[in-house]
Image: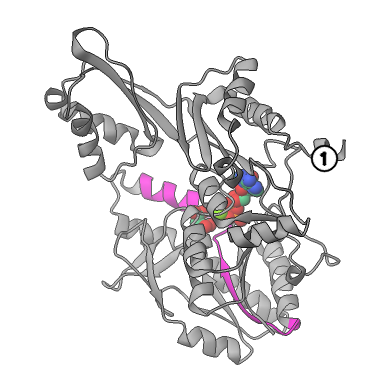
Amino acid sequence: MARIVMKFGGTSMAGTERIRRVANIVRKQQARGHEVAVVVSAMAGETDRLVNFCREANALYDPAEYDVVVASGEQVTSGLLALTLQSLGCKARSWLGWQLPIHTIEAHAKARIESIDAAALVASMESGEIAVIPGFQGVADTGRITTLGRGGSDTSAVAVAAAINADRCDIYTDVDGVYTTDPRIVAKAKKQKAVTYEEMLELASVGAKVLQTRSVGLAMKEGVRVQVLSSFVGDDAIPADDLPGTMIVSEDEMNQLVENGEMERQHVTGIAHDKNEAKVILTRVPDKPGAVAHIFDPLAKAAINVDMIIQNVGRDKGETDVTFTVPQADLARAQALLEDKRDEIGFNRIISDSKIAKISVVGVGMKSHAGVASTMFQALADRGINIQAITTSEIKVSVLIDEDETELAVRVLHTAYGLDAADEAA
Ligand code: ADP
Ligand code: ASP
Ligand code: MG
């Protein structure tokens, strides 16, 4: 017998018919003799709809009230799943964030889980009940409801798994695992048997939305075994216990899989894209100590995440251009803050561009293998795709390109690194 957390995303919960299928998957898992807790998302599109209501009600909405509104999507699906499980003859009970409770910090709309009181949950599971928990929500010390940021149900699931010492956290979604790139963009993308925590963390942070970045960091820290798999399966599907999806594993486990011949050693594990950033160029900034600090200090204070930064070589009169990226959602705020500091920074113009995309290649194999970056630059050059900025880490290379070229770039790179599924068959 194992203790398993099963998380179902928005597409899996979209409507009563889909919820019935989810209930069947859960029922079968419990029937195998396991203790089961389920974490659910709101129905697909529901959170977007609720966010829009908040914007319409008040463009400068109070995040505490936003949380009251957006957390409701998961309240609906957790109740509906408990009802559906009961209709199948299972004992089931929902546990809202404030009922367990799931304690978070007070940062509304982007709260972080601090701890979960798991006693009631464990007692419920031990009595043969299926515990259904709405993802995405918690409660602050103030007693007010909080939410964890978009995609946060993945993090709820991993946090619950850690709190109840689960043997596994299965993340059910609309694809059957983690692929070499988004399978909706590249039909030849390959499903991976396993991906390391480190790689998944990097892939998630550069746009592979299959897992929320924070959920991967938490799983890594707490040693939670995570599997990504599909809820869109027939009755004859391989049981989740046989690990049909993608396992997120430690580097040691990965080395073991490679030694056993179950995985190939790859230099590049995945390619991700992100269209949610915007580029900002400040022209004719003084080329002297302290200039860059003046630019980024107000942005940091406003909690605006700056990603890629390029300072061009100085030109005449000791001036230079500074280019960087910020999330599109923060662009207007960033521009206003910089305008405010125009005299202090001493720039000439702000130029911004939201029609950009960041393409990243990720793989732990890069640590020991040179040439990954140059393959990327050459492949993009061969297709006439211009690179506007570059950043690297030990296991990642990212470039900024024109948004219109996103799909082409991802496809070209997928082929250039020999990741296309057909290559394997050849
Ligand atoms: P859920 O609603 O279940 O949380 P998400 O939409 O958040 O699902 O994440 C699943 C989606 O992630 C897939 O439909 C797929 O388009 C996208 N995705 C992006 N990169 C990858 C990847 N490397 N492997 C698998 N899916 C990916
Ligand atoms: N419903 C929330 C969202 O759409 C949380 C989640 O599904 O993970 O962001
Ligand atoms: Mg998701």
Q: Residue furthest top?
A: 316
Residue in the picture at 72% in, 30% down: 415
Q: What range is drawn magenta here?
A: 31-55
Examine the structure image and report whether residue 120 is included in the region drawn in magenta.
no
As displayed, is residue 124 above or below residue 189? below
Q: Which residue is mark 1?
A: 424
Residue 4: image quadrant is bottom right
Q: Which of the two residues, 407 or 134, is positioned nearer the viewer here? A: 407
User: x%, y% of residue 171?
Assistant: 62, 62
- Inspect this view and state whether residue 121 appears: yes
Q: Residue furthest left?
A: 343
| Amino acid of disc 1 | Glu
User: x%, y% of residue 22?
Assistant: 69, 67
Is residue 380 shown left or right of residue 357? right
Residue in the picture at 52% in, 64% down: 219
- Secondary structure found at label 1: helix
Quadrant, the N terminus: bottom right
